[in-house]
Image (spheres, grey):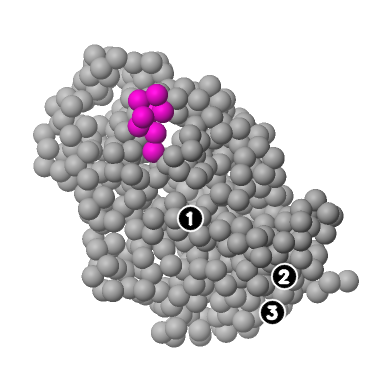
Amino acid sequence: MKKFLDENFLLQTPTAQKLFHEYAKHMPIIDYHCHLPPDQIANDINFENLTQVWLYGDHYKWRAMRANGVNEDYITGKKSDFEKFEKWAATVPYTLRNPLYHWTHLELQRYFDIDAILSSANAKDVYDACTAKLLTKEFSIQGLIKKMNVKVICTTDDPTDNLEHHQKIVNDGAEVKVAPAFRPDRAMAADDVAGLNAYIDKVEQVTNVSIHNFDNYLTALKQRHDYFAANGCKVSDHGLEQIYAEDYTDAEINAIFQKIRANYALTYAEVLKFKSAMLIYFAVWDHEKGWVQQYHLGALRNNNTRMLSQLGPDTGWDSIGDFSQSRALSKFLNKLDTEDKLAKTILYNLNPADNELMATMIGNFNDGSVAGKVQFGSAWWFLDQKDGMTKQLNALSNMGLLSRLVGMLTDSRSFLSFPRHEYFRRLVCNLFGDDVENGELPNDIEWLGKIIQDISYNNAQQYFNW
């Protein structure tokens, strides 16, 4: 019987173990998509206790606690930080076979050198030991990042953000590179005309551009796109149910924009046309600057309206959606490709039923100009666990080139999430190791090791040019 979470965790063969320990383990990390708050990185704060760094904002854990019957007072409510941690510690033994069980104990080991299995029985000891370390200089936020050998972090930022925290990080000479990502979802959210109007007003204030028509709006947003580029941005990101690729004319979009500014409700067809137009403009700007564009597709968000009204978005009420993806995605990418304006692109899929769809779609637009120009991104959100990652890796292997994958990302709001890169690397090494041991791949460790290191770090470094 193997020991839980030992040095060969997830590595089922000697070849897998060799690949991980000699090639993958010590590679740096490029975390090219996350939701870490740049102000906390810039100020290099120390968290006051383990709850603040581990449970604040982590809706993965919140969902597990709710499923375990924990009252919301102990999750997002007014209970003390230690009381919240006690409830999490009591929940952990019930997370067996959920990736949270692995992540929790990996994080305790990698950051705090704690090998204990977390439960109610040792909650106080673990909390006190971790909190004591978190208060030291070595465990400041930049210390935590350095401990995990992270070289680049790409945050997720609204176009109206002034990026002052990114500027401070650069000016202070931080060891880690922290770059913004242009996330313009709110700029095209025509489903909510009142909300979009308020957002347009904000863009107007930030840019000092009077926005009376659609051309004004594009001018203002392009100014923000340029501003992001001047502050080190090389990446855009979109969180969408699906790609929008309706046919439209300039006259139609101008008329729709006038309706928006007049606070008139849009028809469903008008919403789709407006979103379709915005996606094309953003994509063209990305191509002009040589950025990488990312599309996170397939989430059905804010399902529980009662809890949404109480807690707001991004608090754990989202799920996998079953949206139709292929035709609109093909049409969108083809339009850009036909006009020679298709930037390097990463597609993230949330519905595992669409894995093979995505793995074949990328092949339609990989034109040989750049290795892995269009990527089937790593398993995302609900799928970034052993089974979901393995299925994504196998789909890409079967229908594309796994060797050109730009690797893992955390997509996290927690500074303790970087061991997810290790988790991913172990799974990749295990897949290659199994194939070697089964005689399905040659036992060329040097070449296999190069491929492992490429997937772990080198491909991303070259793709994003960091």
Q: Where is residue 97 in the image (x, y as percent from the top left)?
A: 75, 57
Instruction: Report which quarter residue 123 is drawn in.
Output: bottom right
Q: Position of residue 344 (x, y in %)?
A: 42, 41
Element assignment for label 3: loop
Magenta: main secondary structure equals loop
Looking at the image, residue 368 lies above or below residue 160: above
| Closer to the eye: label 3 or 2 | 2
Q: Please report whichever mark, 2 or 1, sits nearer to the chain's N-terminal start.
A: 2
Magenta segment range?
336-343
Magenta-drawn stretch contains 53:
no
Looking at the image, residue 131 lies above or below residue 193: below
Q: Residues within 10 Å of mark 3 (few under 14, many from 20)?
A: some
Q: Which of 17 and 186 is in front in this view?
A: 17
Instruction: Write the residue at 45% across / 28% down.
Output: 333
Amino acid at dot 3: Asp
Q: Position of residue 96 (x, y in %)?
A: 75, 60
Amino acid at dot 2: Lys
Q: How crowded is mark 1: few (under 14 residues within 10 Å), some or many (20 or more)?
A: many
For label 1, the residue is 460
- Cβ–Cβ below 8 Å for labels 2 and 1? no
For label 2, the residue is 18
Amino acid at dot 1: Ala
Q: Position of residue 215 (x, y in %)?
A: 18, 27
What is the distance, in whole Å, between disc 2 and disc 1 at their CAs? 23 Å
Q: Nearer the viewer, residue 313 or 112?
A: 112
What is the distance, in whole Å, between disc 3 and disc 1 at their CAs? 32 Å
Element assignment for label 1: helix
Q: Which of 301 and 213 is in front in this view?
A: 213
Q: Quadrant of the N terminus?
A: bottom right
Instruction: Report which quarter residue 27 is drawn in.
Output: bottom right
